[in-house]
């Protein structure tokens, strides 16, 4: 008798189990795609974060000075440091893109 109840339960769960495996596979695939999307977005943001951040800071500091939150001396000191950082970033040669292929020209003739 115990065997027949186990068989009935197994028969009842049979249609559900394949659906669970498919659902788990889809959930894992979606999780991997979300993770991959977030990593790619973070990768692009790393490339864009340089000069824009200092420029935004300079704008915020200028507004704070205009509102009276910074003295003239504090503003000049911070501005000098930020402008120096901007100049260094602009003078630095651009880094090659990650995983970029470099094309080497072929030499022809002797």
Image: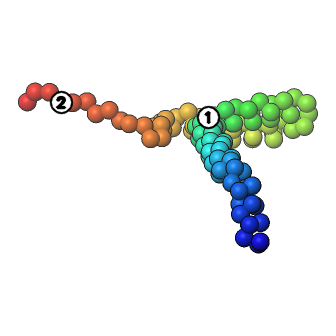
Q: Is residue 71 left or right of residue 45?
A: right
The mark that comes first in sequence, 2 or 1, is 1
Q: Can the viewer see residue 55 in this picture?
A: yes
User: Which residue, as the protein is rendered here, is positioned at the far right?
Assistant: 68
| Viewer-side residue, 50 vs 1 | 1
In the rendered view, would you say 104 is above or below 3?
A: above
- Which residue is located at x 81 percent, y 41 percent? 74
Badge 1: few (under 14), some or many (20 or more) residues near its Cα, within 10 Å?
Answer: few
Asked if residue 16 is positioned above or below residue 75 in the image, the reply reads below
Residue 50 shows up from this direction: no
Left or right placement of residue 67 versus residue 78 in this view: right
Distance between mark 2 and mark 1 Cα atoms: 36 Å
What quarter of the picture does the C terminus occupy? top left
- Left or right of 108? Residue 48 is right
Residue that carries the numbered disc 1 in the rendered image = 48
Pointer 2 residue: 107
Q: Secondary structure at mark 2?
A: loop
Name the residue nearer the viewer: 65 or 109. Answer: 109
Residue 8 in which image quadrant? bottom right
Q: Name which residue lies at 87% across and 38% down.
A: 70
Q: Quadrant of residue 11?
A: bottom right
């Amino acid at each position: 008798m115990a065997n027949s109840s186990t068989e009935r339960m197994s028969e009842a769960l049979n249609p559900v189990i394949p659906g669970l495996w498919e659902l788990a596979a889809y959930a894992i695939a979606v999780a991997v795609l979300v993770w991959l999307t977030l990593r790619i977005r973070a990768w692009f943001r790393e490339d864009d974060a340089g000069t824009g951040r200092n420029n935004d800071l300079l704008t915020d500091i200028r507004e704070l000075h205009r509102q009276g939150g910074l003295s003239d001396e504090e503003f000049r000191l911070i501005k000098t440091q930020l402008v120096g950082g901007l100049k260094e970033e602009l003078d630095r040669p651009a880094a090659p893109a990650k995983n970029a292929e470099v094309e080497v020209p072929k030499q022809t003739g002797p």
